[in-house]
Amino acid sequence: MWKETLIGMLAGVFVFLVSQGLDPAPFLLLGGVLLVFRFYFQGRGVEKSLETLEYTGEKETVAPVTFADIGGQEVAKRELMEALAFLQDDQKTRDLGIRPLKGILLSGPPGTGKTLMAKAAAHYTEAVFLAASGSEFIELYAGVGAQRVRQLFKRARKLAQKEGKKNAIIFLDELEVLGGKRGKHTSHLEYDQTLNQLLVEMDGIKPNAETRILVIGATNRADLLDEALLRPGRFDRQVKVDLPEKEGRLRILEIHTKNKPLAADVDLEKIAEDTFGFSGAHLEALVNEAAILAFRLGNEEIGAEQLAEAIDKVILGEKLERKPERQEVQRVAVHEAGHALVSETVRPHSVAHLTVTPRGKALGFMRPSGNEERYLYTKEYLEDQIAVFLGGALAEELVYGTRSTGAANDFEQAAHLSKEIIKSGLSPLGIVDEEYTPKDKINEVFTRILKEQEERARGILTAKLDSLKQAAELLFKKEKISGEEFRTILQKTA
Ligand code: ATP
């Protein structure tokens, strides 16, 4: 913005001086020379930035990534390997007259191993590997992005020839930045030119060329991509790379703990169970954090305790430096014990552990044990969950007579679930369309669901007030208690 203002001001001054009788010729000449310099260096910048692109050739010093290094994702790996067969078995493809694939699109949440897959694909097909990210192509200046795309394909061919390889894989991460729907961006001309250039390059890939190029794109938002990219002959195979399931998480944990000393009390299967929703990158970070914790403690092995703490750290963030007041911690302990008590009552064995160590934005945390992986939720499950969320504030109310601001996030989540019940047609309203149903009717049912669960949770906590207080006291003293310890208190005080 400031550049445009400056240019405008200079132009104004220039016009003023000319109107005062100044000879404009030397200024125009100087301006011309500056422009020539600018474009020259911009071009150099493009060359330079392309030189820094990641390249995995034969001379690479780090060990190459293979499909065996990727945990879980069996379906995605199978689909990808099938697609790669075209690059491998050249003659057969030609005999059958198959049009080879030019592009494969890997889509899925961040950190699920899309980059790893592309690298493994390069190793599998003995291809040179060039990686670039969509945002590297987008510049304010028209034409630079398109020029970068051209250079990238040229460089892939050149490298393959230099390495004596027949295949080259170009990996384009964040494809939605470069390949978003055309005409949607504010500086759309530059975006459109870059995308057009990518389409031109992909159309130019020929099966009988000296170097066969395969473009692997990765995105977290396939819905944003321009349709022209998904047309047959462009990215005509889409492979979903989703968050790993329990088996996948176990495999990923095994891969990342392979060269780390684990103590005898470590049960990777249990960790896989407790890490529902973690991506491969989360799991890698978890193992690394646990190793750092063991190092800080001066231990020679990574123990179960460090791994459990690392899970909290990955979910919530680093421990806070500032310690809350004693009374605050006591209140947090009551709050967390409230969640846990309702949770154990409505769903036995559902508490993994409780902690009052402040991390990130949370002053305390009850981690549910993730031994159930679900894709569908029943009305009863959602109601139980609402009761668990409300249990924290209600426990504070029962013990101290007042609530605190600590429950704001719990209420948000409870409200979200109540809406979910209505939206999914599970409420007494039946199947509803928010647009056609009177707002006050929806509001009434929304509040009723929350009220009912509030009463239910209050009933549970009142009946077991003694257990609640004892659990909160132990949690306050120990800072962290396991699900087992919590259940023992419940049994003793029953
Ligand atoms: P993004 O969408 O953010 O670019 P991505 O899907 O490309 O992420 P990667 O960069 O491949 O994710 O993964 C990041 C790191 O997470 C990897 O270097 C690896 O350590 C770990 N990781 C992710 N998925 C897996 C997996 N399936 N198996 C083993 N490690 C994994």
Image (cartoon, rainbow, N blue to C red):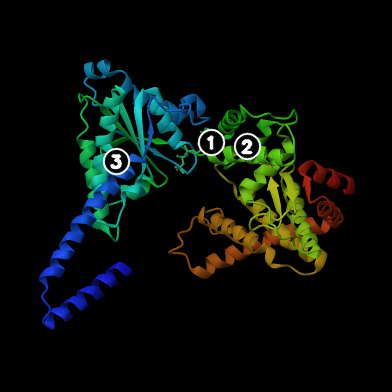
Name the residue rendered at 36%, 22% in the picture.
126
Mark 1 residue's CB less than 8 Å from ligand 1: yes
Cα distance between the residues tagged 1 and 2: 16 Å
Q: Residue 457 location, x and y as percent?
A: 73, 57
Residue extending farthest bottom: 20
Which circle, 1 or 2, is nearer the viewer?
Answer: 2
Name the residue rendered at 22%, 44% in the picture.
197
Which residue is under mark 3?
A: 230
Q: Look at the image and tell me whether residue 129 can be seen.
A: yes
Question: Foreground residue, 38 or 327?
Answer: 38
Q: Residue 221 location, x and y as percent?
A: 40, 47
Name the residue rendered at 18%, 76% in the picture.
14
Q: Which element carries disc 3, helix, strand or loop?
A: helix
Disc 2 or 3, which lies upstream in sequence? Answer: 3
Side of 24 relative to 350 (left or right): left
**Residue type beneath disc 3:** Leu
**Residue type beneath disc 2:** Val
Which residue is under mark 2?
A: 287
Q: Which element carries disc 2, helix, strand or loop?
A: helix
Which residue is under mark 1?
A: 244
Quadrant assignment for the N terminus: bottom left
Q: Residue 421 location, x and y as percent?
A: 56, 55
